[in-house]
Amino acid sequence: MSGEAERIEEGPEDRSRDRQGDLGVPEPRDGSGRDGGNAEIARLVGRLTGDREMDNATRGRLLGRLARLLADSARRAGAGGLRGGRWLADLMTEIAPHIPVRDAATLSAHHHGLTGERLADSLVRVAANSTTAVGAAGGALSAVKFAAPPLLLTAPAQLVAETVVIAAIEVKLIAELHAVYGVQVPGTPSARGAAFLTSWARQRGINPLQTGSFTGALGSAARAALRKRLLRTMGRSMTTLGPFLTGAAAGATLNRAATKRLAEEVRKDLRRQVGAPQWYRELPG
């Protein structure tokens, strides 16, 4: 599907937000050139991980469009590039700097003035709701595909789309939790993107004082951890291929639990780094 049938309408605010994420990397809009496909992938992932509310129908259309683009990208990578999750890891590394991340002040404004632990709780709740929605949307789409067997051939691309979006939502959550806890992650957009990807892969907070935390590129050990984590997330997404709506329920439940578990591990690390700040000691109960 292409042209008008595939286009998702955007307003001026959407176009402005798409051009520049908070990590500082502008996204090409014309889709031309060697990296045009990946630029469009990054833009779609940015929309699917944005802070604006999205209905299920729009989310499903965007996921379907993303799946088609990812299938094209996978074909270009070939069997060698796909082996062991290398293509997927490379793609996430390219997408990471484009994920829209808000600073602490903006987060507080978007969450009714909450700060500290309450703000972190709210971020986790929203992220868990988002990964739940992705699992549900993917499962519902799979139910349709099981009713029409020839379309089941597109299921692997759908799994990759779900995996990429879930990973991006969780990477965004990690980046924003660091902002809430006041843990500054310096460096170029690529370095920060690599740092947050590594944090996601290892399910640990970032220690800016640790030597070698910001290299601008993933080292071999971090890249191996990222591949392993992505493949594990994809395995979780396979539950959405269950018949009828059982896949939607399973995918939603697993995604919510995994996002909350990841957030708690990262928050433990961040609390150890910053100690128990004044606003935390003063919380009632």
Image (cartoon, rainbow, N blue to C red):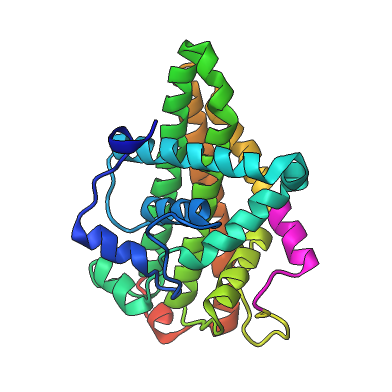
Magenta span has 221? yes
At x 31%, y 79%, the residue is: 105
Task: Give the position of the C terminus as an image quadrant.
Answer: bottom left
Magenta-highlighted stretch: main secondary structure?
helix
Viewer can see residue 157: yes
Please name whichever residue, 139 or 94, is drawn nearer the observer in this view of the structure.
Answer: 94
Please name whichever residue, 217 or 277, is drawn nearer the observer in this view of the structure.
Answer: 217
Determine whether, in the image, residue 66 is placed left or right of residue 226. Answer: left
Task: Give residue 23's position: percent from left, percent from top.
Answer: 45, 74
Task: Give residue 127's position: percent from left, percent from top.
Answer: 42, 54
Task: Give the position of the N terminus as an image quadrant.
Answer: top left
Please name whichever residue, 270 or 83, is drawn nearer the observer in this view of the structure.
Answer: 83
Please name whichever residue, 189 or 269, is drawn nearer the observer in this view of the structure.
Answer: 189
Viewer can see residue 111: no
Image: magenta residue range: 216-228
Magenta span has 265? no
Task: Give residue 120's position: percent from left, percent from top.
Answer: 41, 67
At x 47%, y 28%, the residue is: 139
Q: Quadrant of residue 271?
A: bottom right
Determine whether, in the image, residue 169 is placed left or right of residue 221. Answer: left
Residue lying furthest front: 33
